[in-house]
Image: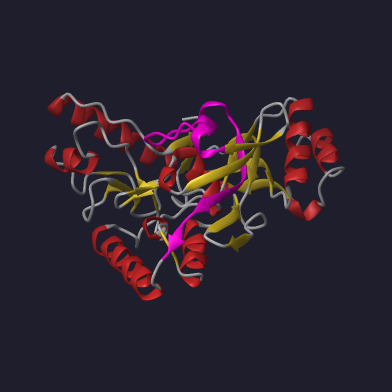
Amino acid sequence: MNQKFYDELLKVLPAEQVKVQEPMKSHITFRVGGPADFFIMPKTKVELKAVISCCKEQEMPYYIIGNGSNLLVSDEGYRGVVIQIFKYMNEIVCDGNSIRAQAGALLSAVAGKALEEGLSGFEFAAGIPGTLGGACVMNAGAYGGEMKDVLKEVTVLTEDGEFKKLKDYELELGYRTSVIAKRNYIVLDAEIELHPGDKAAIKERMDELKERRITKQPLEYPSAGSTFKRPEGYFAGKLIEDTGLRGFQVGGAQVSEKHCGFVINRENAAASDIAELMKQVAEKVENKFGVTLEAEVKRLGEF
C-alpha cells in the first residue's frame, strides 16, 4: 500500500470513506473484477474536489464510477484510485416541473420521484440501471427517449478543479456522447425539465416498459446492459444473432440466449472471459457483415 498517499487522503476524508484493496466485483453490475488499490466514497463536492487534488499532487491515477452498470474491471483490478459517486451523493429535490438530483442518484429513483410528483417525460429512464451522473456523460437513452430530451442544466467539476454549470445547449449531447465525456468533466448534479402528467398514465407507461425489459432482457444474470453501441443503420443484437452467436460462450461469459445484444456473466465468469467473448463476437460479426461493433461497455485496468 502507498502509505504516504493513504495518509494524505485521511487529511481530507474520514477513514470509513476510504477502502484499501477493495474487490471491484462488489461494485460493478458484471460482478467481476479484482481489487482497486484505493476505493473512495466522497459525500460532498468539496470532498470530491479535495480527493482529486490529492490524486493529482501524488500522481495517482483515478477513475470515477457510479453504480458500475457500464463497466468491466480486469481480473487484476486497478492500480489507482476508484472514486464512487453513488450512495452518498444521491439527493433528489423537486421544484415545480423541474427535478434536481445529485450525480449518484439512480435513474430509477429519479423516475420514482417524477411519478410521485405527477411529472411526465422521464418514464424512458425508469429501468436504466445507472446513475444520473453516468447518464449525463453518455446521454443515456431507451425506448425512444434520451437524456438530451429532458436535461436543462448540469453542474460539473472541471479538470482545472472549477465548479461549472452547463446549460442544455452547451452539453453537445449526441449518441452515447457529450461535452462532459470529451472534456473529462465530472458530473456533480443535474436538473431535468419535465411536464405535468396523469400519475396513473405515468405509472402505466413505466410498468409497460418494465414488463418489456423483464420479458426481453436477461435481468436474471449479471451484465452491463447493452454490450455494444448501435452501428448506424443496424442493431447490434440482430447482427450478433444473425451471425449465429446466440448462446455463444467463452468460459463463464455468454451471449444471452434471451437478447443477443447482452453479454452476461452466466456462471462465475472472469473479466478475461467477458473481454475475449466481446472480441470474438466483434470479429465474427465483422467477418460476416463487414460491420464494426464498438463496445458500449468501458474497461478499467489491464486486459
Give the x, y percent position of residue 124: 36, 56
- Magenta-drawn segment: 167-196
Question: Is 176 included in the stretch rendered in magenta?
Answer: yes
Q: Is residue 259 left or right of residue 118?
A: left
Q: Which quadrant does the N terminus fall into?
A: top right
In the rendered image of this protein, does residue 123 appear above or below residue 29? below
Q: Is residue 183 left or right of residue 203?
A: right
**Residue at position x 19%, y 39% in the image:** 240
Q: Is residue 231 left or right of residue 116?
A: left
The residue at the far bottom in this view is 200
**Residue at position x 48%, y 56% in the image:** 107
Q: Nearer the viewer, residue 73 or 185?
A: 185
Give the x, y percent position of residue 62: 65, 33
Q: Nearer the viewer, residue 200 or 11?
A: 200
Q: Is residue 94 left or right of residue 21?
A: left
The image's colouring method is: secondary structure
Give the x, y percent position of residue 133: 55, 46
Question: Is 21 included in the stretch rendered in magenta?
Answer: no
Give the x, y percent position of residue 113: 52, 66
Q: Nearer the viewer, residue 9 or 123?
A: 123
Q: Count how many numbered circles sit on residues in the image.
A: 0
Residue 58 in view of the camera: no
Residue 119 in view of the camera: yes
